[in-house]
Image (cartoon, coloured by chain):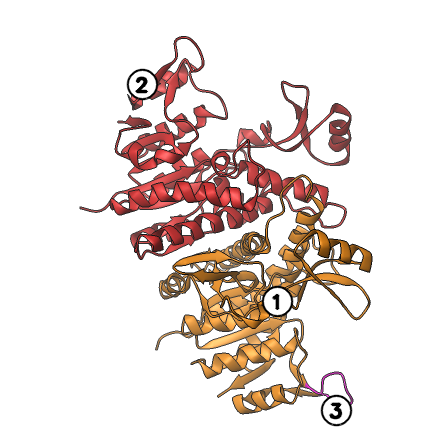
Chain colours: A red, B orange
Amino acid sequence: MKNKTLVVALGGNAILQADEEGTYREQLSNVQKAVAEIVNLIKEGYRVVITHGNGPQVGNLYIQNSLAGEVVPPMPFDVCSAESQGLIGYFIQQEMQNELAKNDIHIPVVTFITQVLVESDDPAFKNPTKPIGPFHNKREADLLGQKTSFVMKEDSNRRWRRVIPSPRPISIVEKEIIKKSIADGCIVIAAGGGGIPVIKKGKELIGIEAVIDKDLSACCLGIDINAEILLILTDIEKVALNYNTSDQKWIDRMSLEEAKRYLEQGHFKEGSMKPKIEAGVRFLENGGERSIIGSLLSASSAVKDSSGTTITL
Amino acid sequence: MKNKTLVVALGGNAILQADEEGTYREQLSNVQKAVAEIVNLIKEGYRVVITHGNGPQVGNLYIQNSLAGEVVPPMPFDVCSAESQGLIGYFIQQEMQNELAKNDIHIPVVTFITQVLVESDDPAFKNPTKPIGPFHNKREADLLGQKTSFVMKEDSNRRWRRVIPSPRPISIVEKEIIKKSIADGCIVIAAGGGGIPVIKKGKELIGIEAVIDKDLSACCLGIDINAEILLILTDIEKVALNYNTSDQKWIDRMSLEEAKRYLEQGHFKEGSMKPKIEAGVRFLENGGERSIIGSLLSASSAVKDSSGTTITL
C-alpha cells in the first residue's frame, strides 16, 4: 500500500504568538514543538508536506519596509511574501532536519519558493479586505491614502490599516516538482504564507500585491499533489458550533454535508475558523479523504482521531 | 553523452547595481537580462544550477532590521540571509520561468532554501572581516560596540561598519536533493548569498551570524554536485594581470598552474577578483573541468570561449 500523503498547515500565529515579542529564539522554539509532533507522523509512515501561514512575520517585514522606506526602497507585498518563505522555511527546515537527526531518520527536507496563481479578475481585487502592517489614526490614514495607492480601512476600534486583496488560489505554480519530491521521499515545505500571489498575462507570470489565505492555499496544494489528508493546525483543540455562546458544542467528527450546512448557518468566524472549514470542505470535494482541524501541539493524536475535528466524506 | 552541468554564480552587485536605487523593477530588469543569457546555455543543452550573491540586498534587509529595531525584534544575520534567498530566488525563478515560457521550453525551475556548513573553529570567527550594514562615525561605532556584541571596524575613509566573520564553506547541507533535481532535469537556484551559514554541534545544525563568500560557495556547490563547469558572472568582461597599471594585461585563458602562480604573485584584489580566481582554482583541483569568469551580459559567449577568462587543467 502506498503511504498516504498529508498536507500540514501551520498557523503563522502559532509560530509567532500574540503574547510574544517575536524574537528569533521564540519562533524557533515554537517551530521546534510543532516539528516534534510532525516527526511522529513521519515515523508512522505518512509522506508529509508542510505549509505555513506568515501573518505576523510578513507584517513585521512590511513594518520594517515602511520604517526604513526613506533609506531602502520598500519592496511590494509579493516580494515580502517571498522573503517570509525564506525566513519561516529556514526555521522549519532546520528544526525538522535536527529533529530527524535526533531520531536517526534520514530523509531530505526541502523548502521551495512557491508561487500561487490567482485570477486577474478575482472579485477580491475590487474589494481588498486583508489588513496588513501597522495601525494608523484617521489623519495618518488619509495622508497615506493620498500619498500612495494604498486602500485604507477602519476597523471596529476606529483604527485604520492598509488592506490588500485576498484572491482565491487557482493552482500552485511549482506543483509538479513538489509532487515529484514527495514521490522521491522528501519532506517538502511549500506555499508558505499562502504562496506568492501571481497572475498570468499571456505566458508571463507577474507578482501582485495580495495575500492568499494560507488554509485555502493548503487545500489547493493538497488537491494539486493528490494528497489524501489535509491537517490544519492552529491554537485551538477542536471546532465548535455556536462558539462562545451558552449553546457551544465541540465537534469531534462531521460529514462533508454537515460541514457545508454549518458553514451556511454561519457558525464559523470570517478570517478565522471559516476559511479552515471551507478549505476542509473544498479538499474533500476534490478528491481528498479526510480534513482535520486541530491544535499545533497535538498533530499526531489529531490524525489518530483522538483529538481535533475530522471532516470525512 | 550526458549533458554537462554548469554552476552559474551571479553577482549580487550585478542584480542591484551600485548606481541604482535598488527598487523592485530595477532588480527584476537586471535579473531578466542575466536570465536571457542563461537560457541560451539551456538551449545548448547544459544543465544549469544558478547561485547568486546577496551583498546589496542583505545589506538592505539588515538596514531595515536596524531601523525598525525598536518595533520589530531584529533577526540575526543567518535569518536575513534566508530572507534574501527568498527575495532573490523569487526574482530569478519567476524571470527564468517567463523566459523559458517565451521560448516554449518546458523545464521546471526551483529555488531551494540552502544551508552551508562551516567549521565552528574556522579562523574567521576570531577575525571578522566582512563589513555589513550602514556606515557610522566613531562615536556611533563605539556606542554600538558597547551596547551590542558587534565588532566594529574602521575603513580607509574613517568610517566605521560592523564586521562579521566570513568562514570557508565545507559542504552544502542540501546537496543530495539539489543533485537529484538536476538529474531530474530541473533548473535549480540554490545556495543564494553564499548559503545560510550553519555549524554542527553533535547532530544539530545551528545558524550563525556570518557570511560565506558566494564564489567559494558556488565552487563548493559545483564540487558537491559533480558539475563540470563553474561560470562566475560579474560586471567585468575578463580577468586582468597588473590590473589598473600601465602593464595591465587581459587574460583569455590560463592553466590551473598559471592561475595559482598569479594568485601567489598577488595580482587579484581581496574580496573582489581574488575569491573568484580562488574558487575557480579550487573547483578544478576537485574534479571540475573548466572555470570561467566573465560578464553577466555575455554568459553564453563566455562558455563558448569567445569572451571572459577560462581556467582549465
Distance between the Cα atoms at labels 2 and 3? Answer: 83 Å
Kind of residue at badge 1: Gly
> Residue tagged by mark 2?
A258
Kind of residue at badge 3: Asp
Q: Are marks 2 and 1 on the same chain?
A: no
Residue shown at 39%/9% (left/top)?
A: A247
Distance between the Cα atoms at labels 2 and 1? Answer: 56 Å
Lower sequence index among marks 1 and 3: 1
Q: Secondary structure at mark 2?
A: helix
The chain ID associated with circle 3 is B
The chain ID associated with circle 1 is B
Say left or right for A206 vs B270. Answer: left
Residue A62 at what x, y percent from top left?
64, 41
Q: Residues within 10 Å of mark 3 (few under 14, many from 20)?
A: few
> Residue tagged by mark 1?
B11
Residue B254 at what x, y percent from top left?
57, 89
> Can see residue A73?
yes
Say left or right for B104 vs B161. Answer: left
Kind of residue at badge 2: Glu
Residue shown at 31%/57% (left/top)?
A: A106
Residue shown at 69%/49% (left/top)?
A: B66
> Residue tagged by mark 3?
B247
Q: Nearer the viewer, residue A243 or B124?
A: B124
Q: Secondary structure at mark 1?
A: loop
Based on the displayed image, in which of its 4 quarters is residue A140 positioned?
top right
Residue A19 at what x, y percent from top left?
55, 31
Magenta residues span: B241-248
The chain ID associated with circle 2 is A
Q: Residues within 10 Å of mark 1 (few under 14, many from 20)?
A: many
